[in-house]
Structures are given as C-alpha cells and as structure tokens.
C-alpha cells in the first residue's frame, strides 16, 4: 500500500492525544533549559503510551532498539519513533568543520562528509541528522560561523545541495542514509552583534537575496526536514513566523516535509514576548508551520484544549502528523524499525580516514607564502614545531559527538611531521597554552626556534571557543599566543604560522613577521596528517576563503558582496574625508572572500562572453549566456586553482552588490598546462528578489559587469547588456 494510503488509514485510527504525541520530540541523554525532558524515563513512558514521535540524542544501536521496541511493541498503534542527532561534520570520522569544507570550493567534500556520516550514524541507530546548517553569515564573532559555509549565498547553496545528497542519497530507507535537516530557518546568521539567539531585522529583499537561497536549494534538493531558528525575523520569532514557515516554505516552495522546532524554541515564544502562555506558544507554532516540538511540551500538554476551543484546526493538526508519518515511512521505519546491532560501525575505517584527510587538506588556505617559505625543506635537519596546538589532539571542531571526541581525537602536527620527515629532528615546544596568560614556556620555544633550520608555529583558538553560544567580542589569538609569535619573530628566523580556528581571526598584528601563513580551520580527525601534507608539499594547497578576514573586530560586518554606497572609499584618493571608511583603520579586509594562494602560479584571462547583449525577456524564457575563461599554470609544479565568476548589475531598482558569486570551478593543472573553464549565466544568476513579500524575482535591462578571476577582487571584466 502506498505511503499516503497508509498515512490516511493510520490517521483514521489515531486519537487526538496520539496525534499530538507524534508531534513531540524529547531528548534522551541531555537535559537543559525550560521544558527539558526527564531523560530516558519520560521518553520510555511516552513511547509506551503512544504519545511520542521522536527522540534526539539517543546514543548507540542497542539504546535505540530498546526504546524503539517499547514504541513498536507496547504502544496501541505501534508507530515507530524517529531518532535524531546532531551529526554536523562526522559521527566517528570527524571531517573538517563545515566552514573549512566551504574553503575547498568543492561541494564534493561536503557530499563525502554526508555519505560517510550517514553510513556510520544509521548503522548506530540514528535516522535523522540536524544538518546541514546553511545560515549565511558575515559575522566572525558568531561562534556558529564554524558550522556554516560562510558569507556567500551561492556557495552555501551549492554546499547545501551536496551535503543533503550525501546524507539522503536517493532512498531514505537505505541502511546507509539518514534524513537531513536544513537549518536554521531563517536568517540566524544575521543576529545583531553576532550574538547567538539575538535579534535579526532584515528587509524582504535582503532575506530573499542573501539568507534564503541556500534554503531554497535545500528544498529543491529534496531535504526531508527543516528546523526553525531561535531568532526573530523583523520582529516575529521564526518559530511563530507564518510568512517564513508556511507562506514561503510550504506554499511558495511546496515543501512537504517536517518542520521541527529548535531546542525548546516553541517554549521560547513566551520568552520572546510573542506568546502569552504555553498553550498560546503551541498554538502559534503549529499554526505558523512548526510540525514537531523539540523538548518543550506545549503542544502535547495543551493541544487537546486548543483543538476543542478551535484555536488550532483539525486540518493543520492532521497535516503535521501526516508529515511526521511520511518521514517515518520514507525512512522505512514501519517495515524495519530496528537496526542490526551487529552491523553497527564501531570506529572510523581506513577509507573514511583517508577521505577525511583528503578533505582536510583540500580545505586549507595558503594566505601568505613569501619567498616560497613553504613547502618545508624536508632535508632540514631540525624542524621546530611550536605552539599550544602543535601537539594537540583537540583539532576536531565545534560539534563532535562526545564519544568521538574521547575515542578518536585528531592526530597531532608534531607526530605527523615526524612521520613525514623521519630523517629530521623535530623539536617541539608548546611555548604558551591556548588560553591563559602563562608565558614561562616562551623561552624554551625561542631556544627551539634558534636551534632549528625550519620553524612552524601552530596557534589559534580551541574548539571550545567556537560553535553554539561561543560568540567572541574580539577576534585575536586567545591568551599569550601573539606574544609567542612576537618572541619567535624576534629570533630573526623565517617561520610559518599554521592557524587553527572555527572562524576568521584578526592576524594583522603579526602577519608581516611571518613568512607564510596557512589557515587550517579545525580540520577534524586527520588534522595532523593533513597539515603535514600541506606543509611538506605532499598536497599543494588550493583552498579559498569562504568568508572575509577582517582587519579588526570593529570592522565587522565586512564582506565582499557589499553595496557600493553613495560615498565609497577610493584607494586612489585616500585623503578624501567624507567617504565610507574608518579613520583609524586601513580600508578593506585583511583578506577578501575567495582569496587563497598555491605553491604554483596561474594566469587567468578575461571572461569571454558568448554574446554581449541579451533581452531580459529571452533570459526569462530560459536563454543563457556562456562565459569562458582561459587558465594556465605558469609555475613550477601542479596545483589547483579555483576560477570564480562574479557579476555586478550596475543600475537596478534595488541596489545590487558590487560583486555576486555566480560560479566557481576548482581545477587541477599540471606545470605549464592550460585549460578553458566554462560557466553559464541564466536569469537566476542575473536577476534578484524585490521587497515584495509574495516573492517577486526580476531580471531588469541594463549593463552587468562579469568578472572572472581567483578571488572576489578579480579584475578581469567583460560587460553584458541586458536589453
Ligand atoms: C541546538 C541548536 C540546533 C541543534 C539542536 C539540537 O540548540 O541550535 O542547531 O540541532 O539544539 O541539538
């Protein structure tokens, strides 16, 4: 019998309380915040009474099966539970953080993470991950930038589709696939001050041109679920925002899956000052489009009275239940509710580790490399490896499963360099801790640097300073790490800095003193070996920045796809007073979006257009413009380049960004090799959303400059006239 018939048949047999139970998700292992569950006991009781739809944070196949057996074999209707877990960048095999993955400018990296994570998680009883997080953000102060794919809507959209494909494949019923969740809907990355959970106030056009494209890509990719975000959107909390959850997501995008609340997000409608009490919160959330309530119990407790009083409709209730049941049918849980405990993946496999190592190396960005300081000369007899992260296994990243953190820490840089250069003598000196003011180890670090032929300093921020609820007001290196760098610099020895972090950092204070800088992010389980691969040249770095590096936290937000303003700063006239600039800071970012060097060099030609004019009507009818860019490897060794395509609509009814990424290709060229990279520009690339709340996308006549190059500062330009 097709799912829809089985859903109808079940709905016909369910009581109102059982229907409301399907909309309840409780936590199993973690209890925090208002309306928190009482852990296992509450979940087991609700499951036995058939009043529970889902549980999150169930760890292990045996625990999942035990809880599932109660729901399936002891409740009246035997409806299986769906188990959710935050598998953000790995289950056992921790991949680089999502922000790092975006730096690869290669969505296949995210798909590999998704597929590996799905295989490991599903075998351990997880059906549903609360990932990918696809919040565009320009806020490096926000700890959750680590979970994001950075500041660009187009790049994030491509990664969203790839990650969902990795998790879900083509059949959610497969034993190696899990349901994905597009989160946090929406505009969470725009929180004022970069402070978690804070206010977001955006115009409709900025919402639709900046924050929504990745979510529409997720819906188009068939993502099974969405998660509402904690923040308000222009005064209305997302958990009670019918314009977002129903108007846009379920009506305009025709989304048929499940919208789950964030942790106690329904209850928080009271705290926002949007709901009068718990019953009102349940009413507002369900009516606006939330289908399942995570951890708080507003609907389970008040749904019956709301329904009998006519404050929620039978139709909406049945629609929400149908969505939940549909997810369970698609996952195959009615036919196969239990997982084979003997087949549970218990540890990272060699191939999974290899994929994580390759991914981590592809994510690294060579920010600076003066006088070809890198790759290291492995014939160097002594290599000093200095800094608090040189011998650290704490490089996995912001959101890692507790057991994975404990059992499978990242390999260290010291170990990996020693393995890569067995003939060299590795002198390790921590110098300082990752945090705190202790400086007594600096002398030893300086001595190690003086005695070495090559010097590597591994510094950054610990994962504990990254991720949710980890907003930083400053973006410098924590503790005394900058003093450590200064002391090493004072030796006069050339040195390389490897930065590990979950966000862009302000590095201008010491950047000039370092010969080379590699941004390694938090690279995951294979951190040490991947960093060594890049430092030794086994891998030629080809990553690019998916987020702007500011000069100062005071400069934030600073991003490439900005408006020109009426008084832009002109570097050719630096002394002009009345322009948009800081009087106490050089203009522009430390490093722009899309920046990244290589151990070789490339030459890219001007973008060649297949036509220099096209009618707006033709574009709207599906016509396209092809763009080709010639690229040559002009250096001494093979390497990767990311050719990027940007547009700038010079005159429009809504001011357009000075650059908008509309394409990228990561290519590998041998020494001296040339190629031609091809892009296609369609209406979706050249138009934009207006402020019309019903969703109006327009393509307007006028000149559009098309840029191609190797960062958002690309100069190669051709002009397209839309008539
Ligand atoms: C957290 C996060 C969300 C996560 C959920 C369940 O507060 O906001 O991203 O999926 O709770 O852990």
Image (cartoon, rainbow, N blue to C red):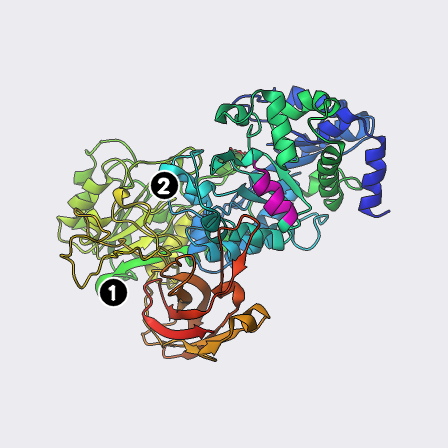
Disc marking residue 471 = none
Q: Which residue shows up at 67% across the image and 38% down it? A: 125
Disc marking residue 372 = 1
User: In terms of depth relative to the viewer, which is nearer, 492 or 703?
Assistant: 703
Rounded to the nearest angstrom, the CA distance separating label 2 from label 1 is: 27 Å
Mark closest to the chain's N terminus, 2 or 1: 1
Highlighted magenta segment, given as a residue range: 241-251
Q: Which residue shows up at 67% across the image and 44% down it? A: 257
Q: Is residue 281 above or below residue 159?
A: above
User: In terms of depth relative to the viewer, which is nearer, 586 or 127?
Assistant: 586
User: In terms of depth relative to the viewer, which is nearer, 668 or 584?
Assistant: 584
Q: Can you see residue 697?
A: yes
Relative horizontal placement of residue 4, taking residue 410 as reference (left or right): right
Q: Secondary structure at mark 2?
A: loop
Q: Quadrant of residue 454?
A: bottom left
Residue 134 image offset from top left, x and y in percent? 50, 47
Relative horizontal placement of residue 231, taking residue 639 as reference (left or right): right
Residue 541 image offset from top left, x and y in percent? 37, 61
Relative horizontal placement of residue 11, taking residue 141 as reference (left or right): right
Tags 2 and 1 in contact by the CB under 8 Å rule? no
Q: Is mark 2 within 8 Å of ligand 1?
A: no
Classed neighbour count for the residue bearing mark 2: other residues with Cα under 10 Å, few (<14), some (14–19), many (≥20): many
Residue 361 image offset from top left, x and y in percent? 42, 57
Residue denoted by label 2: 392
Q: Which residue shows up at 51% across the image and 45% down it? A: 133
Q: Can you see residue 129?
A: no
User: In terms of depth relative to the viewer, which is nearer, 696 or 439?
Assistant: 696
Q: Is residue 198 magenta?
A: no
Q: Is residue 667 above or below residue 164?
A: below
Q: Is mark 1 within 8 Å of ligand 1?
A: no
């Amino acid at each position: 019998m097709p799912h829809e018939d089985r859903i109808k048949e079940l709905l016909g047999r369910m009581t109102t309380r059982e229907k409301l139970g399907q909309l309840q998700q409780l936590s199993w292992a973690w209890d925090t915040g208002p309306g928190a569950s009482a852990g296992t006991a509450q979940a087991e009781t609700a499951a036995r009474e058939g009043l529970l739809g889902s549980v999150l944070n169930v760890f292990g196949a045996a625990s999942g099966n035990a809880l599932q057996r109660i729901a399936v074999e002891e409740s009246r209707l035997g409806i299986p539970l769906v188990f959710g877990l935050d598998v953000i960048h790995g289950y056992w095999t921790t991949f680089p953080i999502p922000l790092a993955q975006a730096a690869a400018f290669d969505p296949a990296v995210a798909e590999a993470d998704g597929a590996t994570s799905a295989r490991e998680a599903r075998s351990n009883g997880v059906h549903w991950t609360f990932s990918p997080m696809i919040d565009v953000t320009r806020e490096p102060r926000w700890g959750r930038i680590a979970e994001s794919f950075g500041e660009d809507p187009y790049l994030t959209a491509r990664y969203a589709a790839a990650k969902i494909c990795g998790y879900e494949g083509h059949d959610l019923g497969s034993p190696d696939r899990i349901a994905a969740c597009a989160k946090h809907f929406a505009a969470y990355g725009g929180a004022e001050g970069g402070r978690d959970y804070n206010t977001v106030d955006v115009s409709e056009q900025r919402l639709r041109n900046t924050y929504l494209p990745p979510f529409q890509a997720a819906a188009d990719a068939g993502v099974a679920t969405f998660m509402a975000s904690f923040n308000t959107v222009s005064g209305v909390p997302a958990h009670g925002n019918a314009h977002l959850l129903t108007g846009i997501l379920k009506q305009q995008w025709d989304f048929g899956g499940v919208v789950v609340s964030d942790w106690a997000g329904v209850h928080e409608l009271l705290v926002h000052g949007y709901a009068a009490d718990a019953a009102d919160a349940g009413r507002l959330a369900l009516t606006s489009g939330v289908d399942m309530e995570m951890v708080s119990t507003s609907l389970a407790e008040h749904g019956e009275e709301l329904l009998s009083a006519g404050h929620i409709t039978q139709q909406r209730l049945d629609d929400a239940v149908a969505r939940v049941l549909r997810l369970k049918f698609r996952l195959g849980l009615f036919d196969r509710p239990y997982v084979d405990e003997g087949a549970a993946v218990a540890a990272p496999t060699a191939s999974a580790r290899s994929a994580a190592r390759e991914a981590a190396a592809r994510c690294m960005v060579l920010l600076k490399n003066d006088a070809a300081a890198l790759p290291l000369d492995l014939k160097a007899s002594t290599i000093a490896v200095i800094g608090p992260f040189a011998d650290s296994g704490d490089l996995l990243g912001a959101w890692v499963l507790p057991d994975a953190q404990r059992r499978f820490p990242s390999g260290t840089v010291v170990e990996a360099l020693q393995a890569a250069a067995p003939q060299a003598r590795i002198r390790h000196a921590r110098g300082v801790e990752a945090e705190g003011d202790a400086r007594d180890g600096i002398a030893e670090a300086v001595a190690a640097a003086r005695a070495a032929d090559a010097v590597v300093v591994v510094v950054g921020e610990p994962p504990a300073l990254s991720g949710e609820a980890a907003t930083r007001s400053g973006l410098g290196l924590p503790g005394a790490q900058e003093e450590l760098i200064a002391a090493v610099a004072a030796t006069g020895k050339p040195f390389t800095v490897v930065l590990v972090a979950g966000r862009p950092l302000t590095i201008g204070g010491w950047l000039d003193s370092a010969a080379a800088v590699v941004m390694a992010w938090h690279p995951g389980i294979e951190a040490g070996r991947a960093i060594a691969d890049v430092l030794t040249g086994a891998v030629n770095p080809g990553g690019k920045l998916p987020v702007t590096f500011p000069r100062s936290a005071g400069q934030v937000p600073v991003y490439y796809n900005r408006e020109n303003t009426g008084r832009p700063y002109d570097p050719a006239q630096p002394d002009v007073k009345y322009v948009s600039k800081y009087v106490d800071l050089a203009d522009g970012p430390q490093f722009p979006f899309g920046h990244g060097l290589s151990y070789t060099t490339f030459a890219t030609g001007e973008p060649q257009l297949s036509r220099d004019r096209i009618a707006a009507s033709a574009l709207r009818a599906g016509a396209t413009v092809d763009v080709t860019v010639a690229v040559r490897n002009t250096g001494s060794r093979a390497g990767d380049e990311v050719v990027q395509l940007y547009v700038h609509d010079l005159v429009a009814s809504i001011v357009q960004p000075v650059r908008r990424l509309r394409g990228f290709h990561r290519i590998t060229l041998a020494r001296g090799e040339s190629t031609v990279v091809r892009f296609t520009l369609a209406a979706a690339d050249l138009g934009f959303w207006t402020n019309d709340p019903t969703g109006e996308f327009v393509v307007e006549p006028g000149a559009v400059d098309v840029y191609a190059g190797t960062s958002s500062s690309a100069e190669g330009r051709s002009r397209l006239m839309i008539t």
